[in-house]
Amino acid sequence: MPKPALPIAPSVKSLTARRSEEQDFIMRHDTADSSVWYIVEIGWLQAWKQFVMNGSDPPGAINNSRLIADSGSPKPGLLAVRDYRAVNSEVWAFWHARYAGGPVLRRSKIDLYSDQLPDPLKPATCDKVKRSGSAPMAGVASESGGQLFAALSTPPDRPVAGQVVLAEYGPSQQTGSVQLTGMGGWYLARIVKMHGNSCDVSWLRPSADQWGCKTTLRQYLCSTGADETLFWDDLSIASQIRIPAENIQPA
């Protein structure tokens, strides 16, 4: 029996470019003020800083579990700066798209013990999404070749950074010098930055318990074989961004 192939380690050159890219993004988008804060455990943050500043290995998935008890409530006695820091929606969207992990701790102020704000993304139970209407469904092609997403609507209000949306992916288009591949369609993404009438997005990844569900996976760009770690820049808010209608709820 042949031995399984070993994973190919990233080259020093690719890690160097990645460190530079990540450090530059955070320096440009980190802010002292925000209406929404995402709590990040200090150990993970220090590991990330070692990666981008001192050449250490990548930090792995964000791990906020040290901050949370088995009951789901914050552990007592934790302090900002010593035990955790907080970042804005743009920084969180960048990190979470690249590293995944959690749990997501979303607050209106830099205080772990303040009320949890609802996460904009609420994954549906596999094959139990109530659908209505005839708008596109993410990642599912119709017999005529078009892309369908159930019960989507163009939002009456402008989306904001950090909001979860469906973004249009076009394999014939390019981002920077990278030619994209995969099936065109609408896939779950988080808005990273607004630019007037356009925005940048990061593609979302499914949670661990969603990987066995083909229907749910079709909502994610990674199901097409495309590189979901790339950011998609300057999408038209009017024509390339959609928000699931309020009547889509888990059954």
Image: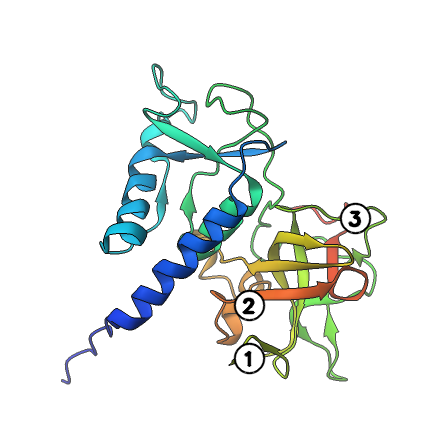
Amino acid type at mark 1: Gly
Q: Which of the pair 82/162 is nearer the observer?
A: 82
The alpha-carbon separation of the residues under discs 1 and 3 comes to: 28 Å
Residue type, numbered disc 2: Leu
* Alpha carbon separation for disc pair 3 and 2: 23 Å
x, y (%) of residue 127?
Answer: 60, 58
Please indicate, yes or no, whether residue 251 appears anywhere in the rendered image: no
Name the residue that disc number 2 marks.
Answer: 221
Q: Earlier in the sequence, mark 3 or mark 2?
A: 3
Identify the residue under disc 3. 158
Q: Are marks 3 and 2 in contact (CB under 8 Å)?
A: no
- On screen, residue 104 versus residue 121, left or right, reads left
Disc 3 marks which amino acid? Arg
Question: What residue appears at the point 82 percent right and 56 percent down from the top-left corner?
Answer: 154
**Can residue 159 be seen at all in this image of the molecule?**
yes
Residues at marks 2 and 1, CA–CA distance in whole angstroms = 8 Å
> At 74% from the left edge and 83% from the top edge, which residue is drawn?
143
Secondary structure under the numbered disc 3 in the rendered image: loop
Q: Are marks 2 and 1 in contact (CB under 8 Å)?
A: yes
Q: Quadrant of residue 56?
A: bottom left
Q: Residue at x 74, y 58 (%)?
A: 242
79 to the left or right of 227: left
Residue 12 location in percent, x, y? 24, 70
Instruction: Give the class, few, some or many, for how many residues have Cα within 10 Å of label 2's Cα (few <14, many ≥20).
Output: many
